[in-house]
Image (tube, rainbow, N blue to C red):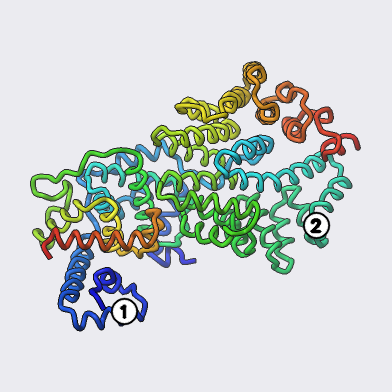
């Protein structure tokens, strides 16, 4: 079993250990380091900025509650992302949501306003956001986050066959949307 | 070869077998259309990969997170609910087996627990020869060191029990015993390690349950898959878990996790997790069944208020189970120390013609929840059963009158 120290450096390991013992300041440091990654994931999975905020917030609270079960088998950030994916799933199961709406610039609210290639990126983000939910989630986890199919299938509670066909569908729809 | 659209994604991702990869590449060499398709997929993947991995939220979420943390203390493994309430477990195993098919695991745990409770009762009375005789029975065919380990286990000296077991050659049975000792020590990592190393059905199920409790469903599924086909309780239990885990419904996955927590003895956390899942679920018959099961579990694990909330959330009692709803209300009253109310509720059940054995089990369960020996005796109501004897033994009351003659409790009470 790899340790958190081996994956991400000792300082992280110490903060996790402190937070697991109830040290809120240590947990805040972890929050500050990882919130961008967790929010980006939630935003792309939910395609709804308000829901993404709620899910990111709940992901950190859930992570705090489950810290006792984290034993460094993956880097802390990856573990947090797994927690976040689960929170998003539970959230989508729990209630009907307002349909996704784009803001005036065509991008979901709250995106980083200075991307390296603004036009292309905004187009791609918008195209991803308009994909059907299942296809979108698989594409985000596989192509943006780099998860293997087996992990995605386990996290979403579906088979690898399903994640592969969803990915095929998502990429085809994206090519169409982006005119490629 | 016709066009290879269906394989291009896997080809771009490097997920094809050697043979398929060669076939796709042969086709691409001669097909402009599929080459363009592959290039387009590669372009999409590269663009997706190039998206920023971090996006700052539009507002600082920390103040809201911090406020929520205050209301949500970190649950630790060390704050497990006390074991106890074995009569309650029996009642619940009986209640649940028919309802959701997951009683099997509880029964398996209970079978083990019952032996320990019995031998502990003798030890508590200081009757060592009788305890030794019982232990001989339990560890039939075992070696001397193993018996000593079992003795240490029964006495609650788990460190010594484990040290003794560790001195023996590593057989599968031995590793399963170490997993069970680790469960009593609340060392879940060791439960997982030894349970898995044993390779035996019950050990693999224990290890899978720890994986589930740790939110590692894929690992749990792998272990459960190994014993799914086994005959009897072990196979049934694995199949029940796998059905929940394979369901596309996240709620069912959540129930699997809560059930594992319950089986591992983390009752309070299990009940709270299940309640959260259930309350977010739209009304349905299966929800009502689950609400009833978990209300019973909440009532017997120190959460009568939550139990009442769950009962009140039911839209309609499941068919033929209306009496069980009332019985659960009686349990809630007993857990609150309202013995008179609980007795009155049981009386209405008898008048309404509920199943006699069901009422008897429920009364014994209520007795185990009673706050004092006198209440326990009143709740048992003179029935003769092992469940009642065990409930009274737990409540610190004399049980000679209620123990069946041919049971261990009866024999033991007579021998004194």
Q: Which residue is more in the foreground, B280 or B94? A: B94
How far across and how far down the image is residue B2, in percent? Answer: 24, 75
Indicate which disc residue B147 carries.
Answer: 2
Residue drawn at (24%, 57%) of the image: B54
The label number, if any, that marks residue B21 in the structure image: 1
What is the x, y in percent for residue A180?
A: 12, 66
B334 left or right, relative to A26: right
Q: Is residue B102 above or below residue B388?
A: below
Left or right, residue B70 beside residue A45: right
Question: Where, quadrant-wise, is the N terminus of chain B in this rendering?
Answer: bottom left
User: In what element is the residue under mark 2?
Assistant: helix
Q: Whole-percent x and y of residue A49?
A: 22, 45
Q: Residues within 10 Å of mark 1 (few under 14, many from 20)?
A: some
Q: Which callout, 1 or 2, points to the residue nearer the camera?
A: 1
Mark 1 residue element = helix
Q: Residue B18's image quarter? A: bottom left
**Residue A143 vertical position relative to residue A23 in the rendered view, above or below:** below
**Number of numbered markers:** 2
- Kindly identify which chain the residue marked by label 2 belongs to: B
Q: Position of residue A109 (x, y in %)?
A: 16, 46
Asked whether residue A29 is in view, the answer is yes
């Amino acid at each position: 079993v790899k340790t958190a120290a081996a994956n991400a450096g000792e300082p992280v390991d110490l903060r996790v250990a402190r937070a697991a013992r109830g040290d809120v300041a240590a947990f805040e440091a972890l929050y500050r380091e990882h919130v961008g990654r967790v929010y980006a994931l939630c935003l792309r999975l939910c395609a709804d900025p308000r829901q993404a905020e709620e899910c990111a917030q709940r992901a950190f609270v859930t992570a705090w509650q489950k810290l006792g079960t984290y034993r460094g088998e993956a880097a802390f950030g990856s573990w947090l992302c797994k927690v976040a994916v689960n929170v998003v799933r539970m959230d989508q199961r729990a209630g009907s949501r307002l349909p996704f709406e784009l803001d005036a610039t065509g991008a979901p609210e709250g995106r980083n306003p200075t991307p390296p290639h603004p036009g292309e990126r905004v187009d791609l983000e918008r195209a991803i956001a308009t994909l059907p939910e299942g296809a979108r989630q698989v594409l985000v986890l596989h192509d943006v986050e780099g998860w293997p199919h087996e992990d995605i299938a386990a996290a979403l509670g579906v088979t690898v066959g399903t994640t592969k066909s969803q990915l095929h569908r998502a990429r085809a729809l994206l090519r169409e949307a982006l005119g490629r | 070869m016709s066009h290879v659209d269906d394989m291009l994604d896997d080809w771009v991702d490097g997920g094809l077998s050697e043979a398929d990869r060669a076939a796709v590449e042969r086709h691409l060499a001669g097909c402009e259309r599929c080459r363009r398709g592959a290039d387009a997929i590669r372009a999409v993947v590269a663009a997706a990969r190039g998206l920023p991995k971090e996006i700052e939220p539009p507002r600082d979420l920390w103040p809201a997170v911090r406020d929520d943390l205050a209301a949500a203390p970190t649950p630790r493994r060390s704050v497990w609910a006390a074991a106890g309430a074995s009569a309650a477990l029996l009642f619940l195993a009986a209640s649940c087996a028919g309802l959701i098919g997951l009683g099997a695991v509880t029964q398996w745990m209970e079978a083990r627990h019952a032996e320990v409770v019995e031998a502990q009762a003798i030890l508590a009375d200081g009757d060592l020869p009788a305890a030794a005789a019982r232990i001989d029975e339990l560890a039939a065919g075992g070696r001397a060191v193993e018996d000593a380990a079992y003795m240490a286990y029964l006495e609650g000296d788990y460190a010594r029990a484990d040290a003794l077991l560790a001195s023996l050659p590593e057989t599968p049975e031995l590793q399963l015993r170490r997993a069970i000792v680790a469960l009593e020590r609340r060392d879940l990592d060791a439960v997982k390690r030894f349970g898995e190393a044993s390779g035996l059905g019950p050990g693999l199920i224990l290890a899978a349950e720890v994986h589930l409790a740790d939110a590692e469903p894929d690992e749990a599924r792998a272990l459960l898959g190994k014993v799914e086909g086994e005959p009897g309780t072990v196979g049934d239990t694995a199949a029940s878990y796998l059905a929940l885990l394979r369901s596309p419904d996240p709620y069912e996955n959540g129930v699997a996790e809560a059930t594992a927590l319950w089986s591992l003895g983390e009752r309070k956390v299990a009940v709270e997790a299940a309640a959260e899942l259930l309350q977010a679920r739209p009304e349905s018959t299966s929800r009502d069944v689950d609400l009833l099961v978990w209300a019973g579990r909440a009532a017997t694990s120190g959460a009568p208020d939550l139990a009442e909330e769950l009962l009140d959330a039911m839209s309609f009692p499941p068919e033929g189970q209306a009496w069980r709803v009332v019985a659960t209300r009686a349990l809630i009253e007993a857990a609150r120390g309202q013995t008179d109310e609980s007795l009155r509720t049981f009386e209405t059940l008898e008048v309404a013609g509920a199943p006699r054995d069901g009422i008897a089990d429920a009364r014994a369960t209520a007795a185990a929840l009673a706050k004092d020996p006198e209440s326990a005796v009143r709740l048992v109501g003179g029935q003769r059963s092992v469940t009642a004897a065990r409930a009274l033994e737990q409540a610190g009351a004399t049980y000679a009158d209620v123990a069946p003659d041919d049971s261990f409790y009866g024999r033991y009470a007579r021998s004194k």
